[in-house]
Image: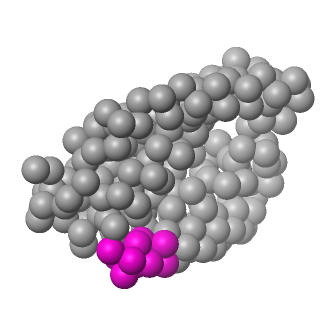
């Protein structure tokens, strides 16, 4: 039977949502280089990918596949953060970031459904959601403060601000990944 450290899982959920809050504004700058039809194609691929994943739910809605897929999903941010840092403000860099984000979104429904099955007590699910919202709000505040700090130091161009923010995001993602790994050790959870 697979297990989780519930305390560490909450830390992971907080840091993951913190990352999401901090990074929220970056996509508007990064994706500005992409033509609108890109988002239609991406949406079609996302919907088809999520649909295909749903055919494997009977095999995937278990703790072990959840851990494997979640680990894979948390490796993807390293890829798109490095993609942007290596190819900032380029069409292909933006396309790569968008494509990697779409891959992670394909598994969004699956991860949510499986999390509900693994952590089924209502009280713990409430803790997860509260922790996520606190992390997300905190991330929005951190992002805002970081942009203010950059402006204070004379970095006013939004592309430069987003580029600098990616170093903070890379550091945050390291903490997200480490907290995820620590959450995998703990008491058994039924699926």
Quadrant assignment, res 62: top left
Name the residue at 70% across, 18% down: 92
Picture layout, residue 25 above or below residue 134? above
Residue 127 belongs to magenta span: yes
Q: Residue furthest bottom?
A: 123
Give the main secondary structure of the magenta stretch. Answer: helix
Picture layout, residue 86 above or below residue 186? above
Residue nearest the observer in this picture, 135 or 160: 135
**What residue range appears in magenta?**
121-131
- The spot of residue 175 in percent (x, y) is 34, 55
- The spot of residue 64 in percent (x, y) is 22, 41
Residue nearest the observer in this picture, 153 or 100: 100
Question: Left or right of 29: which side holds 128?
Answer: left
Name the residue at 74% across, 37% down: 30
Name the residue at 84% across, 35% down: 32
Confirm whether residue 20 shows in the render.
yes
Residue nearest the observer in this picture, 13 or 28: 13
């Amino acid at each position: 039977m697979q297990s989780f450290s519930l305390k560490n899982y909450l830390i992971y959920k907080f840091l993951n949502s913190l990352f999401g809050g901090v990074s929220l504004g970056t996509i508007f700058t990064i994706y500005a280089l992409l033509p609108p039809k890109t988002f239609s194609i991406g949406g079609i691929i996302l919907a088809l990918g999520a649909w295909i994943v749903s055919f494997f739910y009977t095999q995937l809605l278990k703790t072990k596949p959840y851990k494997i897929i979640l680990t894979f999903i948390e490796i993807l941010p390293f890829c798109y953060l490095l993609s942007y840092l290596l190819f900032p403000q380029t069409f292909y860099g933006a396309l790569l970031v968008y494509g990697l984000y779409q891959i992670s979104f394909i598994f969004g429904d699956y991860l949510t459904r499986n999390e509900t099955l693994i952590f089924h007590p209502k009280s713990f699910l409430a803790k997860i959601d509260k922790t996520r919202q606190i992390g997300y709000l905190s991330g929005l505040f951190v992002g805002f403060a970081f942009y203010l700090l950059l402006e204070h130091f004379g970095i006013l161009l939004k592309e430069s601000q987003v580029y600098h923010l990616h170093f903070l995001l890379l550091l945050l993602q390291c903490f997200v990944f480490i907290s995820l790994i620590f959450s995998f050790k703990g008491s058994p959870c039924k699926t």
